[in-house]
Image (cartoon, helix red, strand yellow):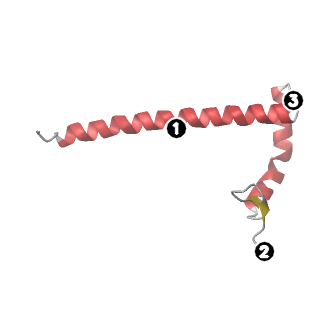
Amino acid sequence: MARKDPLSRAQEIEEQIKKLQEKQRKYIEQAQREIGQYLMETWDIEDIEQAKLLIDKFKEEAKKYFGSGQNTEGSNGQKTSDQ
């Protein structure tokens, strides 16, 4: 069996990287859609602008909550504390 040309192999790897990046982008988009849908359903919101206003209103509180390192959920779904 003949060895592949290194440039050819590099090109194949580059194509694989592009395919994986596209796959990653699709997964991220899907997650964002699901999160948005969950938020809209949970908060019973029908208007996108209303949702944006609520997100903006609570974003600093969310950053503090998740950035503190406390009150994070463990893998079992229970809240834990670093203390």
Mark 2 or mark 3: whose residue is earlier in sequence: 3
- Looking at the image, residue 45 sits to the left or right of residue 74; the answer is right
- Identified by mark 2, the residue type is Gln
Mark 1 or mark 2: whose residue is earlier in sequence: 1
- Identified by mark 3, the residue type is Ile
Where is residue 70 shown, x and y percent of the image?
A: 77, 64
Identify the residue at the far left of this view. Answer: 2
Q: Nearer the viewer, residue 53 or 37?
A: 37
Judging by the rendered image, the residue that carries numbered circle 3 is 45
Mark 3 or mark 1: whose residue is earlier in sequence: 1
Where is residue 77 shown, x and y percent of the image?
A: 75, 54
Front tag of 2 and 3: 2
- Looking at the image, residue 6 sits to the left or right of residue 53; the answer is left
Residue 20 quadrant: top left
Q: CA distance from mark 2 to mark 3?
A: 37 Å
Where is residue 44 shown, x and y percent of the image?
A: 88, 31
- Identified by mark 1, the residue type is Gln
Which quadrant of the rendered structure holds the N terminus? Answer: top left
Judging by the rendered image, the residue that carries numbered circle 1 is 24
Q: Are marks 3 and 1 in contact (CB under 8 Å)?
A: no
Identify the residue at the far bottom of this view. Answer: 83
Kindly identify the residue that appears in the image at 79 percent across and 60 percent down. 79
- Looking at the image, residue 32 sits to the left or right of residue 4; the answer is right
Neighbor class of circle 2 (other Cα within 10 Å; few <14, some 14-19, many 20+) is: few
Q: Are marks 2 and 3 in contact (CB under 8 Å)?
A: no
Kindly identify the residue that appears in the image at 77 percent across and 35 percent down. 38
Q: Nearer the viewer, residue 77 or 71?
A: 77
Kindly identify the residue that appears in the image at 71 percent across and 59 percent down. 74
Residue 13 quadrant: top left
Q: CA distance from mark 1 to mark 2?
A: 36 Å
Residue 27 quadrant: top right
Judging by the rendered image, the residue that carries numbered circle 2 is 83
